[in-house]
Image (cartoon, grey):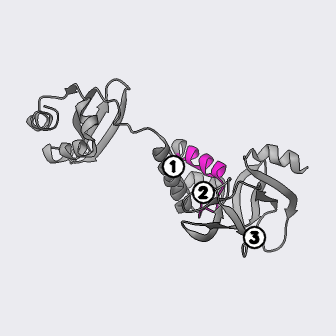
Amino acid sequence: MNSIFKQLLNVKGMVVENVCIVDGPMRPEPVLEVRVRPRAGMLRCSRCGRKRRGYDRGGGVRRWRHQDFGCWRVELVASMPRVDCPKCGVVVASVPWAEPGSRFTRDFEAECAWLMTVANQRTVSGFLHIAWRTAGQIARRVAGRLRASAPSPFDGLHAIGVDETSYRKGHTYITVVVDHERGRVIWAHDGYGKDVFDLFFQQLTPGQRASIRVVTGDGAKWIDSCVHEWCP
């Protein structure tokens, strides 16, 4: 049974110790409780992320909401071991199934973030049985992780386009910069004009600015002046 749930959870570095159904008057619905622990040798410091030696089993038990198995709500339960980190001291170890400080597994957060791309925040929160503010916080965490792991959109720029567009009945403007070769938006900011376009170039390194060979625009003077200043 434990080996089957380990395959279903599909988390590297995890050991499934026990699986049971928990029900009672204090719970609105039965929960499939999966007791797990990090595999030996997989302990990492939750602050610096490096592998460290275990210090003790910790002083408590934590729960993480996981993706539902059909109609069953699933929670992972584990004692929180501590590690002895020469850099950070004795701290709680990170776990391979969740981000430090999160009450949800990475798989649950990924599912929530994907649902947020096809439905509104209130619908997603109702479907997953979480607070709507929690759904928004999860989506922001996932987006932050993706940005941190993805290559910079400013690397390898050769041909960019810039223009301003209005919304809210034409009373509010936003400046948008696109990468022509990859066909995607790489930067946007409220407002328009030279001061706003300057903010884009200020985010680029000298090497990133030097790689730009073509800038397209609608002939606005503020676009031309920025290009002559930053990409002569």
**Disc number for residue 145:** 1
Which image quadrant is residue 19 in?
Answer: bottom right
Q: In this view, does 222 lie to the left or right of 99?
A: left
Disc 1 versus disc 3: distance between alpha carbons? 28 Å
Which numbered mark, 1 or 3, is in the foreground of this view? Answer: 3
Q: Is 94 situated above or below 216?
A: below
Query: Of tags 2 and 3, which is closer to the observer?
Result: 3
Decide whether the magenta segment is chiefly helix, strand or loop.
helix
Give the magenta range.
Answer: 100-116
Q: Identify residue for label 2.
A: 99
Relative height, residue 182 to residue 70 (above, below): above
- For the point 31% across and 30% down, the residue is 157
Where residue 162 appears, as percent x and y from the top left, is 23, 33
Residue 149 image offset from top left, x and y in percent: 49, 43
Whichever of labels 1 and 3 marks the residue nearer the N terminus, that label is 3
| Left or right of residue 218, residue 137 in this image | right
